[in-house]
Amino acid sequence: MKYVYFFGAGKADGTGDMKDLLGGKGAGLAEMTRIGLPVPAGFTITTEACDYFFKHGRKYPKQLRADVAKNLARLEKLTRKKLGDAKDPLLVSVRSGSARSMPGMMETILNLGLNDKSVEGLAKATNNDRFAYDAYRRFVQMYSSVVIGLPKEELEERLRAMKKKRGLKDDTQVPAEGWRELLGEYKAYFKQKTGKNFPEDPVEQLWGAIGAVFESWMGEKAVTYRRVEKITGLLGTAVNVVQMVFGNTGDNSGTGVCFTRDPSTGEKTFFGDFLLNAQGEDVVAGIRTPMHLSELKTRMPKVYQQLEKVRQTLEKHYRDMQDMEFTVESGKLYMLQTRTGKRSPGAAFRMAVDMANEKLISIEEALERIKPEDIERLFYPVIDPKLARAELSNRKFAEGINAVPGAAVGKAVFTAEEAEHWAERGEKVILVRRETSPEDVGGMYVAQGILTATGGKTSHAAVVARGWGKCCIVGAEKIDIDAAAKKMSSNGHVVRQGDWITLDGGDGTVYSGEIELARPEPPEAYETLMKWADKVRTLGVRTNADTPQDARAARGMGAEGIGLCRTEHMFFKDFEQPEKSAERQQAIQEMILADTSEARRTALAKLLPFQRRDFIGIFEAMNGLPVTIRLIDPPLHEFVPHDPAKQAELAKKIGISVEQVARRVEQLHEANPMLGHRGCRLSITYPEILEMQVRAIIEAAIDCQKRGIKVLPEIMHPLTLDKKELKILETGTRKVADEIISESKVKLEYLVGTMIELPRAALMAAEIAEVAEFFSFGTNDLTQTTMGLSRDDAGRFLPEYVDERKAAIFKADPFQTLDTDGVGMLMRWAIEQGRKTRPKLKVGICGEHGGDGDSVRFCYQLGMNYVSASPFRVPIARLAAAQAVIEEKSLKKTAKKRSKAK
Ligand code: PEP
Ligand code: MG
């Protein structure tokens, strides 16, 4: 097994496609070396070594020590320098890097190889005492915190104290003597805490660093990041040991991060930050606010030109936007990293469409580049454009750099921990920090938006928030944050913890107070790309909608019909005429409390006109498209009050005794209502409910047809478990419907079908399809009943089932992403069996999974006719359906190639 891959002087053992093995950084360094870009030499320890490390009780593979020694010797030979040398020492950086970028989540150690001897060598070789001791103290500082785990804050505190004592503000002002003094303090602190001297042996230092990088793979923040980003299936992190180059040797040195296109807007401009006389971490950590790349153009025109060329080479080579790190050491450019850059959702669309138009990629590739989250986040809110400008400017609190667009409203909190606690209580929060660090990632995730007082557009806060499409403002330097006192001030105004603030990530303004937000219009590129998706896909996409408003909104999002209209939602609320809601509620409650079938019918008659009006609105909104309407589903006790005061109120309203109400509610009580008297069982026992609902549907349809509105109703029975049961319901349905239709003399076609929500129904699908004209998988209930996990309670323990450091039983929450192995097996069977009986059986899905990208792809593979998703997830389903076709095509292509090769 080869655990170590070398690169340097134009040659590399690895290549750019070995990301899984070498990590993104390692593969990028190898590839950049191969194509002749200026990259310092080094070697990469593979992710397989990391995997071995964790699988063998944190032991390295046997041959690793020898392999590392061999490659270190090769590096020393190539650079003509030696680690720990007293004259002109080799120094290395030790960096993490997994196959998926996890900005700042894992560890890095710079300047490794320095000790009391080699620091003198470095000082002599560079003729710069101050630089050498600065490099040394940085190393000791990093090593102490990253490898040994000493608290960062304690070390920083000593740095601040030293500067204060000397009356200095910036690190760049500290003389060699200051760094020497700090080194002494760091080492004393190290000894006091560990009982040992700081390690002088560079090889011991190296192994300490390698171990720490591996460990950081399982560190809290990395694990959290993988969970929220849904990153699974990776072996671990690689370790890159690379010759150090220095951006902090003076004013003709520096370090920067740049993107081949603007990651916020997607525009094709060269975009980036640069810090003069600084080391790489200073840019990413957002400690100093950097200058724009255009300034580099004036300060170092030659370097800029060279960098511009690298930009073009890399984008063409990788055929995607690249995020690059570089260092200029005494006027010479070095590339330290290239990777596919994270981008805002809007930028993702613009880049995909632009690159396809530039013929850099194909339309299929453009479609594959958009993630479901990009779409979801595209519709994130902005400050309501109708708000008066003057009103806004009155509320202005501060200004910063607009790192990630969108707007956010929430209560200010000053620590990530607090953000998590508040969010758990259901509060909306804005996380305010001087700068964020990877430890904050949990709090950042739950926050509506993020505000930092320092940093540029490539700071940690900006990069992480951008990946999530979360509104973020950085570098709001005028804000004075007092985290201990839980407040911040700016312009003479104070915001305390819990006060509302509003961020406008579009222009970087921070407002005090709670400002109204509005949903934005999607960019042009969105429309183009979605049109491309619609051309490619074959799977239909419908929506789950219960009101005319939702139906209209979903049509705007591209829905091709309704896959699920939950009629019971109409019992409680009148969406068109809210003042009539109480009347509806009373009618349904009367129906439930009724003792006789007659009394029930009287109550249902009151409900009929309401339901009919609802259906008319929905049919109008969906003119010409199919509408699946599901009859009553939830257990009746959900509709009646449980507390005595409300019961008394109800009794008075409908003129019966409180005792009667209480008794009926008590009768309705069930030990396990999800498996109780619900679904079509209600229509079996109370056929008058079915009759009223079918009447409302058909009368509404006829009313619409008469007015030239085309209606395609599909009447759906929920939770069916038997053919005989469905037959009774179907007969009842057709009896009512056909009578009304024939009386009206209007031509109206309709379908009668069922949901498949129980394992028994899936297993007996062949028989059920003798009656059902269509199936719609209710995968919320089907998941619940197949797994025996309550959809309402599983949230308490499911996180542990998904957490890779805990039980890691599932890759994803089965209520969000279909369990294709188990539930999926039942679905596959049901479709096969159903279509054996009825070859043209229409099949769809209307559980939450219909709006989940991975699940939609699976539904396509099963040969469904359509998926149905909530309105805002309709575009996700459209895109996923197109991606499924592309994926299938490419799989077929590879299979063909393989069989040819044989
Ligand atoms: C389902 O069970 O998947 C479904 C769509 O029905 P509901 O969520 O209303 O139970
Ligand atoms: Mg259901």
Image (cartoon, helix red, strand yellow):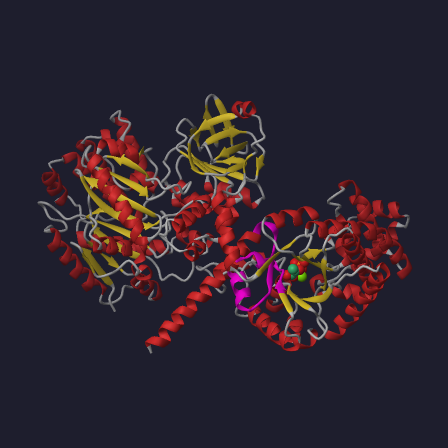
Of residue 704 and residue 592, the one placed in the foreground of this image is: 704
Magenta-drawn segment: 844-873
Q: Quadrant of the N terminus?
A: bottom left
Residue found at x 66% / y 77%:
837
Foreground residue, 427 or 878? Answer: 878
Q: Quadrant of ligand 2?
A: bottom right
For residue 839, above or below residue 73: below
Left or right for 98, reference 588: left
Q: Position of residue 692 (x, y in %)?
A: 82, 58
| Magenta-colored stretch includes residue 22 | no
Q: How many marks?
A: 0
Please tell me in which quadrant of the rendered image residue 752 appears.
bottom right
User: Could you tell me residue 767's position as x and y percent?
Assistant: 69, 77
Whole-percent x and y of residue 852? Answer: 54, 57
Residue 142 shown left or right of residue 367 in the figure? left
Residue 860 is one of the magenta-drawn residues: yes
**Quarter of the rendering occupied by the C terminus:** bottom left
Residue nearest the observer in this picture, 513 or 757: 757
| Residue 893 visible in the snapshot | yes
| Residue 349 image offset from top left, x and y in percent | 45, 47
Residue 800 in sight from this viewpoint? no
Q: Nearer the viewer, residue 365 or 480?
A: 365
